[in-house]
Amino acid sequence: MSSLALAANGRTRAFAGAGAYGLAVFCAAALVFTVEPLVGKLTLPVLGGSPAVWNTSLAFFQLGLLAGYAYAHLLQKLTSVGRQAIVHIAVLALAGLSLPLQLSTAFGPPSDEAPTIWLAGTLFLTLGAPFAALSATAPLLQAWFAKTRGEDARGVYGLYAASNLGSLLALAAYPSLVEPLMGLTRQAQVWSVAYLVFVAGTAVLAATMARGASNAAAEAAAAPPITGRQRLIWLGLAAAPASLLSGVTAEITSDIASVPFLWVIPLELYLLSFILAFGSKREGVRPWALGTQLVFTPLALLAMSKADMPWTEQLTLQLLAFFGAAAVCAQALSASRPAPARLTEFYFWLALGGAIGGSFNAFLAPLLFPEVWEYPAALVLCMLARPSTGAPLEQREKVWMAAGLFWIAPLLIPVFTMPDMLAAAMRLTPAAVALMLRRRSVAVCILLAALAASAETQAWGRYTHHWRSFFGVLHLHEVETKGLGKLTVMVHGTTLHGAQYLDPARRCDPTTYYSPATLIGQVYATEQKRAPQGLSIGAVGLGAGTVATFVRPVDKMTLFEIDPLVIRVATDPRYFSFVRGCAKGPVDVVLGDARLSLSKIPKASYDLLMIDAFSSDSVPTHLLTQEAMALYLDRLKPDGVLLLHLSNRNLVLAGPAAATAHALGATARVGWHWTLPQASPYTEAAGEAMVIAREAETLDRYKTLGEWELTQPKGRPWTDDRTNVWGAMLAHIKGLGA
């Protein structure tokens, strides 16, 4: 065989080897990003939809990833790739003994006193071993690949791009394909089989490729040592975009738009930034990333102070600014990557930085900041990742800096107000100076920090009060209506939670979705008319407490609310007096997830049970499943009525709700209420609702109300095993198109 043929044959085998490793890394990442939402949904019926559940789950996955990367790095102490492969295949196989995937019952039912500890332990027993082993596989495969390529091993970092591509595609596929097509039980079964197939494939790959591995000890000794300063740089460059990811997600979902799956876009952009950085052979931070960051970061900071800016423009600016900052950090990380022999340590510090950045936003930021301040702070700090000359500022540059800070200074004073046009012009000055000083990362950071502070300071003037909890940001502000006076309005993120007149004569008038003319108002009037002796009422979702205005002296009501901050504000007479001042009968407020709380209520307790928890983008699907509705119907008296408030800006929920009711043998009527175009949503809101009862005769009293009609089952009922939020969103889009 000629030398050319031998060379071609070698290139073919090298390409095949790279493809095999790339496929394995891709599959490992896809399995990791598929199992995270799967296990999270498994916990919903048991623990409910509390953010503490998601925060604990997120922390578990971050720590699992970190543990996997630490194990992969420690395994490099074995100088033989063959021995490493034997150990890791054994670890993968042992971890597979915990399959098939199902929520562990070793700790029994969750404890009310320490649910976080229960969840952490349950997640560890359910998924800990396979998750950590899978997480370790990607860096290990890359390390083994590097040892089979010799001098060409520098291209091993391209496999990190393949890993992120697997994560990105799995992330996109889960809500749009996996969840609608398979129930949780089937998902867990398929994932378990896929894991075992992956273990077998990895074993074959390791056995094939380990033969050509080089001496790991010699390569490690020859590789340049890693300094403590370099480790800190990696830590910062990984923590900043991870914090930025959580921050921009909170910003766009709480203050810009209420759209399902909107959180997916920032995560996909985050993964894309790493794909582009590590999938390219070019070194250094690319001009397009530097330009995107420098142009859109100031614009995003300026947009934060513009309450009247269309949400589509706000969203576009924030996502472009986020992507530019994340791309700069990812490319800076890629440019500083060490020799392949130090690869696993590099990934360990990346994982540690990601865990620190994500944990700060999840656990500390809500306690430290009343608004999502961690997001603009991270945007500004990411400017430090830009290449900088490092030389002292020249005299003209100092003059520019002084001018930029001088013009922005008045806007940093909360009580100082000025016309919007003048304020915008003043904010453009530090933004323009930042463009001129683009090679001075520290100076640009200072200028944009002042710009961000001015935007946040002035934005506070929109609201009379601000609070923040793990459930999001709660605002109060005042609005003026034509001829009806002022109202205090409660807004949670972008979702209206209630409004109350300031006029003492109208303080107890029901408003928004509870106005007497609305569907909810009709239901309360109908049920109270047929029961003059009094009603026992349960209501899920407190909001401002408007529903309490319906309580007569002979009625009694129990309100269920998951957010303690909402309870504190709604029951404080300084803000709202519906619950403590307008209700004429007893009203109790119960804190906790509604489904878990209702499970402790005796059967046949309520004449009327209302579930009002579906108006935001984060629909608690576990409150609309067949198991949940069976629980609701059990808590009703024989002639009781279940009322579902189904109004949502982005989802059609009537179909799944009707199908679920019919699957339980119940009867349902759905209603739509429309308002005049000039009507204020704060005084009377349009909406959709459904009444459900065990017997058809129970709902006969709604026949004479023109807005209610009998429903027919459409589609498949939602269950704890299968929900389809994606389908509900597509149904809404289709309805708009029609």
Image: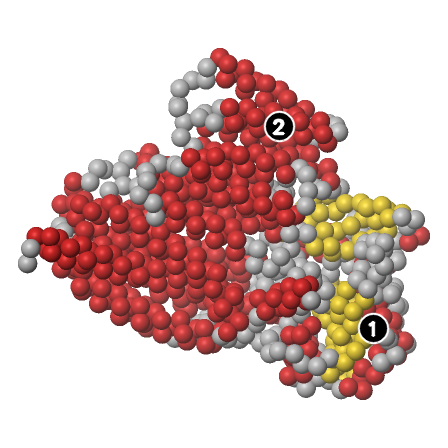
- Seen in the picture, residue 23 relative to 391 is either above or below; the reply is below
Q: Amino acid at mark 2?
A: Leu
- Disc on res. 707: 1
- Seen in the picture, residue 78 relative to 687 is either above or below; the reply is above
Q: Secondary structure at mark 2?
A: helix
Residue located 19% across and 58% down the image:
12
Task: Check disc 2: other Cα within 10 Å, few if <14, some if 14-19, many if 20+.
Answer: some
- Asked if residue 360 shows in the view, the reply is no
Residue located 39% across and 56% down the image:
165
> In the rendered image, which quarter is residue 616 located in?
bottom right
- Seen in the picture, residue 438 relative to 375 is either above or below; the reply is above
Task: Check disc 1: other Cα within 10 Å, few if <14, some if 14-19, many if 20+.
Answer: some
In the rendered structure, the answer to whether residue 640 lies left or right of residue 49 reads right
Colour mode of the rendering: secondary structure
| Quarter occupied by the N terminus | bottom left
In the rendered structure, the answer to whether residue 153 lies left or right of residue 102 reads left
Percent position of residue 582, x then y: 86, 59
| Quarter occupied by the C terminus | bottom right
Residue located 39% across and 62% down the image:
30
Q: Amino acid at mark 1?
A: Glu
Which residue position holds label 2?
428
Q: Secondary structure at mark 1?
A: loop
Q: CA distance from mark 1 to mark 2?
A: 52 Å
Percent position of residue 226, x then y: 26, 38
